[in-house]
Amino acid sequence: MTARFHNPVDTRFGWGSLLELADITAHQRVALVTFPEARALGLVQRLAQLLGERLVYVIEDVQPNPDVAQLSATYERFWQQAGDCDVVVAVGGGSAIDTAKALIVGTESGHFDELLALLASGQPFVPARCKTLIAVPTTAGTGSEVTPWATIWDALSQKKYSLHLECTWPRIAIIDPQLMLTVPASVTVSTGLDALSHALESIWNVNANPISDTFAVAAIEDILQCLPLLRHDLANQELRSRMALAALKAGLAFSNTKTALAHSISYEMTLRHGLPHGIACSFTLPLVLGLAWGHDATRDRTLQRVFGPDLDQAQRQLREFLHELGVKTEFADYGVTAADSQAMVTFALQGARGKNFIGRLARSETPRGA
Ligand SMILES: [Fe+2]
């Protein structure tokens, strides 16, 4: 048995670890990318105090699911007004970190359209310039702080692009669970389920290996135990820390495998039905578990370490877990007909992430529960 694991992100974890940002950015000019509520939460002021004169530029209007329609103007303003900054610090959930990943990739012309054309070509490219990224997640879920990927949406054309370059790996990730204390219940649940999906998707994945499995299994066990408790005890520091660590482990797991079928399905559910990412990529987990099971003895063994030997029981456990968190688990619950859901699963299997899935369906096979 051989395995290889690579993750270049210098990762700092711990309560209050945000304070390390001051030393990390000493003598550098910092651009901050954060979410609109950060100012009302006192976070922008706190960062401004921490960074002092280092802070030269602030973007605080990042929207959920960064879309080309908004990103274009932000990108061009950033390169015109903050092109001389040394480092971009992204503070927020997946949308803030993904937005920052798109911003740091500089085109020759400074125009966003050039970047979009490169992404649309689907070919690898070396950017004209690139800023250093420091990622500070404020939710326990995205994993974007330890991966190189960013999802860029184009709702108007019903498309999404995946940005992935050597320079879009964050240089440093600071995971400070204290920043997650104010996250409301609905976002705590949806982001936590995103992390659960990352961990499971890294297991039923053609790129899985024993090292990614180690992170994934630990993450799943923690999330199954912690998330229902945390939902009713949002100020609990220990639970916040455990969920933050679980989401980090899930991020590390899929940083080496990428995601698979549940995420491939989620992109359609977000584009067409407007589901938040964490719900879109988790409501199908019991279904996808059924499709994954029985295709590969090693993968089955890893899944059985978490769920035991019985598939029906495993699916029931996952379904009940999601229901307890208020998440419905059938396509019909989201207004998708049986025929449409089957077409969506078939389409998702052909997508880039779907091709990572171990349990590829025969065309005529009907997904259980779809
Ligand atoms: Fe995700």
Image: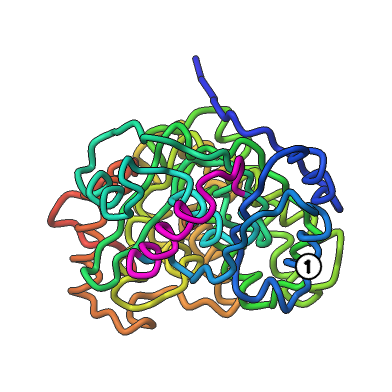
Question: What residue sits 68% from the left and 61% below the top?
Answer: 138
Whether residue 330 sits left or right of residue 13 in the image: it is left
Name the colouring of the figure: rainbow
Taking the spot 26% from the left edge, 48% from the top edge, the residue there is 114
Residue situated in front as seen by the camera: 149 or 111: 111
The image shows residue 259, relative to residue 241, as above or below, that is above
x and y, in percent, of residue 200 in the image? 51, 49
Q: From the top left corner, tell me how far across and down residue 145 is, in percent.
A: 59, 46
Residue range in magenta is 68-88
Residue 359 at what x, y percent from top left? 31, 45
Q: Judge by depth and name the residue closer to the eye, 102 or 245.
A: 102
Taking the view exactly as shown, the residue that stands out farthest to the left is: 364
Specify the quadrant of the image occupied by residue 171: top right
Amino acid type at mark 1: Gln
**Magenta-drawn stretch contains 279:** no
Query: At x 54% / y 52%, what residue is drawn?
Result: 82
Q: Decide: is 19 above or below 62.
A: above
Q: Nearer the viewer, residue 97 or 280?
A: 97
Q: Is residue 191 visible?
A: yes
Q: How many marks?
A: 1
Residue drawn at x 25%, y 44% is 118
Residue named by callout 1:
45
The x and y percentages for residue 334 are 36, 81
